[in-house]
Image: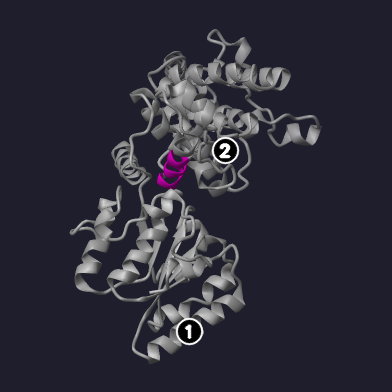
């Protein structure tokens, strides 16, 4: 197997980062990924059978994708080739494929690990297909992005996607323990600072070990508290890419928390997006949409609260204007919910497409000319304000179309009152229909 230090142009005595020193030397040493590496898990079964299929390893940074690929090659005695989609092009791929074909003739298979595989364009991804299909290479692609969006369907259909988890507290604690053994002493952190350090890592094991190395190099005699730790280490920005899947995941979480009337969860996802650098006005646009789609007539004030958040934020900016966004989130989360208006709009549009160009009934058409009056326009129209109830009960659907019901209010919020009104109007229409031959 290709030597790590030869690849990097280093000799065995060269400086190695702590994260590299602690790189697992066997599959059993990998932490936090038992769901894919356990004996009954996908990779565990592959290793037991001695047969490896091409894989996509999808997960956050610092969760062991490169390490797992190296260990798989070592365990199965495959030649290990590694390239990065950031720095490699078609010429590099051709060299790798030629070398793999030569090895195959000599009786040895090749595991090709492609870091950031999603950064290859469509034609570059397609170039893997024949070599994956004929077994020249076993391809393992690593990505932090959703393969469904970033990997060509043809290539994705020939690979198994395995999801790596961000390191949880137990996994990060295990890495800290290993680091302390490696450096030969415990970190000078009180328990609160140790917890804070793991929170700063945000599931990234490599970042955690880099922080440990910084703390070790800085020395010190007194245990640090969280404030002292923060002064020494810059806070890590949350993993959030406004143009990629994280953006859609978090706005979906916010929307569904609002729909579920969970104000606290909604505030949490709002804070996650704002601290991640999301455009506050993008969030407000979604709140306006939510007010229409998920609250509607159950609380007509909801749309005004959402629009007020827009106006206040545009007037005050960040951070002051973000408070009004939070207030709108609380209002929308605690408001009565109804999608009756949303459903009604969809149903009415569907009916309009099906019925085409049916004319309105003649009695509700204006007759500005004598001809139009002669052919019945406006004949028999009942002026609703002249009726005792203020509602005539006449038919307003096309004559050749049966009456349909689109809007069905719920028994929540203001729609309870609307429901009573609609039942009253419907009774008047039935009475009118019984007394008039339409």
In the picture, the quarter occupied by the N terminus is: bottom left
The structure residue drawn at horizontal position 57% and vertical position 72%, both measured from the top left corner, is 124
Numbered disc 1: secondary structure: helix
Q: Looking at this view, name the residue that lies furthest to the bottom.
A: 105
Which labelled disc corresponds to residue 407?
A: none
Q: Choose the circle earlier in sequence order: 1 or 2.
A: 1
**Mostly what secondary structure, the magenta segment?**
helix
Q: Quadrant of residue 39?
A: bottom left
Q: Quadrant of residue 300?
A: top right
Q: Give the magenta range.
A: 205-213
> How is the structure coloured here?
one colour
Q: Are marks 1 and 2 in contact (CB under 8 Å)?
A: no
Residue 407 horizontal/vertical position (percent): 47, 29
Q: Nearer the viewer, residue 299 or 104?
A: 104
Is 429 in the magenta? no
Q: Nearer the viewer, residue 216 or 345?
A: 216
Pointer 2 local density, CA inside 10 Å: few below 14, some 14–19, many at least 20: some
Q: Nearer the viewer, residue 398 or 93?
A: 93
Numbered disc 2: secondary structure: loop
The structure residue drawn at horizontal position 37% and vertical position 91%, both measured from the top left corner, is 106
Residue 192 horizontal/vertical position (percent): 37, 23
Q: Nearer the viewer, mark 1 or mark 2?
A: 1
The structure residue drawn at horizontal position 30% and vertical position 40%, both measured from the top left corner, is 177
Is 211 in the magenta? yes
Dot 2 corresponds to which residue?
398
Question: Looking at the image, is 264 positioned above or below residue 59?
Answer: above
Which labelled disc corresponds to residue 99?
A: 1
The structure residue drawn at horizontal position 34% and vertical position 40%, both measured from the top left corner, is 176
Q: Nearer the viewer, residue 255 or 190?
A: 190
Residue 175 horizontal/vertical position (percent): 33, 43
């Amino acid at each position: 197997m290709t030597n790590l230090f030869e690849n990097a142009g280093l000799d065995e005595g060269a400086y190695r980062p702590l994260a590299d020193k602690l790189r697992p030397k066997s599959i059993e040493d990998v932490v936090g990924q038992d769901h894919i590496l356990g004996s009954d898990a996908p990779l565990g079964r592959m290793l037991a059978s001695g047969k490896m299929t091409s894989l996509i390893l999808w997960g956050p940074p610092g969760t062991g994708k490169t390490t797992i690929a190296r260990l798989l090659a070592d365990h199965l005695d495959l030649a290990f080739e590694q390239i990065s989609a950031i720095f490699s092009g078609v010429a590099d791929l051709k060299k790798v494929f030629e070398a793999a074909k030569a090895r195959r003739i000599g009786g040895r298979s090749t595991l090709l690990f492609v870091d950031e595989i999603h950064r290859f364009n469509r034609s570059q991804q397609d170039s893997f297909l024949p070599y994956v299909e004929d077994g020249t290479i076993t391809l393992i692609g690593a990505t932090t992005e959703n393969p469904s969006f970033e990997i060509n369907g043809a290539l994705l259909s020939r690979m198994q996607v395995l999801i790596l988890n961000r390191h949880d507290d137990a996994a990060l604690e295990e890495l800290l323990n290993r680091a302390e053994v490696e450096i030969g002493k415990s970190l000078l952190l009180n328990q609160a600072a140790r917890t804070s350090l793991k929170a700063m890592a945000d599931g990234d094991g490599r970042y955690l070990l880099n922080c440990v190395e910084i703390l070790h190099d800085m020395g010190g005699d007194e245990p640090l508290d969280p404030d002292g730790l923060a002064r020494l280490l810059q806070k890590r920005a949350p993993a959030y890419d406004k143009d990629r899947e994280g953006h859609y995941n978090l706005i979906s979480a916010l929307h569904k928390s609002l729909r579920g009337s969970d104000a606290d969860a909604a505030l949490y996802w709002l804070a996650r997006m704002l601290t991640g650098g999301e455009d506050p006005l993008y969030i407000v646009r979604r709140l306006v949409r939510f007010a229409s789609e998920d609250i509607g007539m159950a609380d007509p004030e909801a749309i005004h609260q959402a629009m007020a958040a827009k106006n206040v934020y545009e007037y005050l900016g960040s951070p002051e204007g973000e408070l009004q966004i939070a207030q709108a989130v609380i209002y929308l989360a605690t408001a009565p919910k109804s999608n009756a208006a949303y459903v009604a709009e969809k149903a009415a549009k569907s009916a309009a497409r099906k019925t085409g160009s049916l004319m309105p009934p003649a009695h509700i058409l204006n007759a500005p000319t004598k001809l139009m009056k002669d052919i019945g326009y406006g004949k028999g129209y009942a002026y609703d304000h002249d009726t005792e109830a203020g509602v005539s009960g006449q038919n307003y659907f096309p004559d050749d179309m049966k009456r349909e019901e689109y809007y069905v209010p719920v028994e929540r919020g203001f729609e309870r009152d609307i429901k009573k009104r609609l039942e009253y109007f419907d009774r008047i229409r039935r009475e009118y229909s019984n007394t008039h031959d339409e």
